[in-house]
Image (cartoon, rainbow, N blue to C red):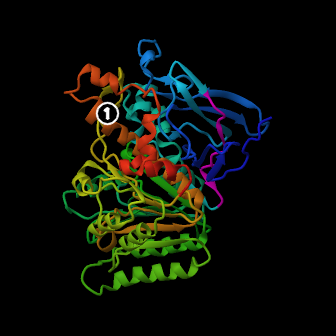
Amino acid sequence: MSPIAKTYKPVVRAKTRDGKLSGAALVGVNSILLGWTLDENLDRGNLLGFGIRRTDYDLEEGMMIRSEWFYGNKRFSHQMDMDYGPTISTYSAPLQRFSWADYTVSNRRSYMYEIFPFWGDPKNFDREEPLRLYVRPSAPHEGDWGIYTNRGVTSSLAYQERFKSIDPAESKDAQTWLSRGMKESLLDIIKGAGKNDGLHIAIYEFEDPDVADALRKAAVKGVDVQIVFHAKEGNGGIGKTREENLAVINAHALQNNVFAREKPLNISHNKFLVYLKDGKPHTVWTGTCNFTFSGFYLQTNMALQLSHAPTAEAYETYHQLLKSDPDCGGRNNPNKELIEEIIREAEKSLRNVNWKVNFSPVSRDHLLEFTNEEIRKAKSAVFMSTPFGLDKSILDALAANSEQIIEYGLCNTTARKKVEQLNSRYTRFFTPSRLESYMGRLWDAKAFGNNKIHTKSLVRDPWSDNPTVIIGTGNFSDEACRRNDENFLVIEGDQRLAAIITTEFIRMWEHYKSRYFINTIYASRTASKAEEVSQMLLDSDGSWSNTAFKETARSYKFREREVFAGME
């Protein structure tokens, strides 16, 4: 019987008996990132690549359920005329890279990943002893923390293969698949509240009928439902948010449960719920997701659920202040000072835990300061999901960082010009792009609009013993500090949260990186058929590995190999 992993570990490291091959798995809930490297003294002249086999095990009995090889797109020249289809098993056509991600795992199973080096001639190769990594994914909720990540539009190829061209609005099965437990985690809290309990919400976009209906039913059975909603008129061309919020409120008879936030300096951008058990703050549900169809199903979003009374108390105090619709304008504003006092009191009550709670608006750039500090502290990697751009101070901090630090980012097309200046060597930011078809398959489902990236997060050094996560409603801008109603968490030393958020970030980043290269190289209108075919070919010797081992090649692959393999 195989020595399967029965408990969760966020980072799993291993090496082969001969020491030639070593690597690491960064383990999330739904995704696992594998990275590996070879002894740098080895002659890689006839290294053809790596095949990966995954074996699934039953957690209770430890018995093997199935074993299968991963598939890739590229193949050797002699395999081009063989009828393999659009993908080919890495059993016969190895991967010529040093990382791979698996987005199809379940915490109800245990897994063994075997990474086999292929050496020799493409028509007559040897598979050497594999690197074996034994992992079990995390449950969505462990201990105080739950974390939920939807699939969103980043999975459009997988959506197309599963649901064809069905509009998600017309399929409950598609919605469940896209939400992947995120919306359900919110509804579970609402539906679980009983008489004498409370549900106190602050929300920017409140349009989802399922959430509104659940809140109405909760109010009817005696739950104290209080909803602070964005209600500012005509600000920045987004005044329709007020009308859409009111339409849902009126349609579900929630008029007596709402508090209009009409006087935010800019927007009341929060998305959180405080659950009060018998009138006392108990749990916070927060994150990046508005209560909308797009938020739950189409954009990339994350939600955190934290059952921790002092944290819930801080959010409840902030919620009660927002209920009064405070005017935070002008210098030395007393309402901003009240928010600062909530933050200070939270720091006192949270001194024995490894996270900090912050709210906006205040009279300082607290989100930017935390972000820039973490960028400067990085020893191996910074991963940022930044939907609507970056403040200049963050751009400067990224640019000033050591060249040895990986800096990977995602943002929407509206922020493309801001981040273009960053793209060099180990810094790579990508924006969403459409890909109608490639290699005979449809790659895009329904066109979901421009703002596909919506998660606002930073992870520093997720392979280390002391990573940091920043996540919340605030975009990385001064407005998120000084003008909007916002909340965010700074979480230090939590390897599980860092691993989960990083693996989901890489899922999104690899998706749009691939589209970028396909759209600019493979699917170029000017490319000849021969050039397109050449992009599908594997190298017949070890030359492909040079960019990953020669630092002078100035490729992001060199440092990525080291970091993803857990070398730091």
Q: Nearer the viewer, residue 1 or 194?
A: 1
Q: Position of residue 476 (x, y in %)?
A: 34, 64
Whether residue 132 is in magenta: the answer is yes
What residue lies at 64% left-to-right and 50% top-to-bottom? 12
Whether residue 4 is in magenta: the answer is no
Q: Position of residue 508 (x, y in %)?
A: 42, 45
> Which amino acid is tagged 1?
Ile
Q: Would you place residue 127 above or below residue 289 in this image? A: above
- Read off the residue under disc 1: 518
- Whether residue 412 appears in this view of the structure is yes
What residue lies at 29% left-to-right and 50% top-to-bottom? 412
Quarter of the image where the N terminus is located: top right
SS assignment at label 1: helix
Q: Position of residue 358 (x, y in %)?
A: 44, 73
Residue span colored magenta: 127-143
Q: Image check: 519 left or right of 255? A: left
- Whether residue 208 appears in this view of the structure is no
Q: Would you place residue 200 above or below residue 290 in this image? A: below
Q: Nearer the viewer, residue 225 or 438?
A: 438
Q: Would you place residue 158 above or below residue 257 in this image? A: above
Q: Image check: 46 left or right of 486? A: right
Q: Nearer the viewer, residue 221 or 67?
A: 67
What residue lies at 54% left-to-right and 73% top-to-bottom? 313
Q: Would you place residue 407 above or below residue 260 in this image? A: above
Neighbour tally class for label 1: few under 14, some 14-19, many 20 plus, Cα within 10 Å? some
Tell me where residue 340 sits by quadrant.
bottom left
Q: Nearer the viewer, residue 101 or 141?
A: 101
What residue lies at 42% left-to-right and 67% top-to-bottom? 487
Q: Position of residue 156 (x, y in %)?
A: 39, 34
Q: Image check: 56 left or right of 531? A: right
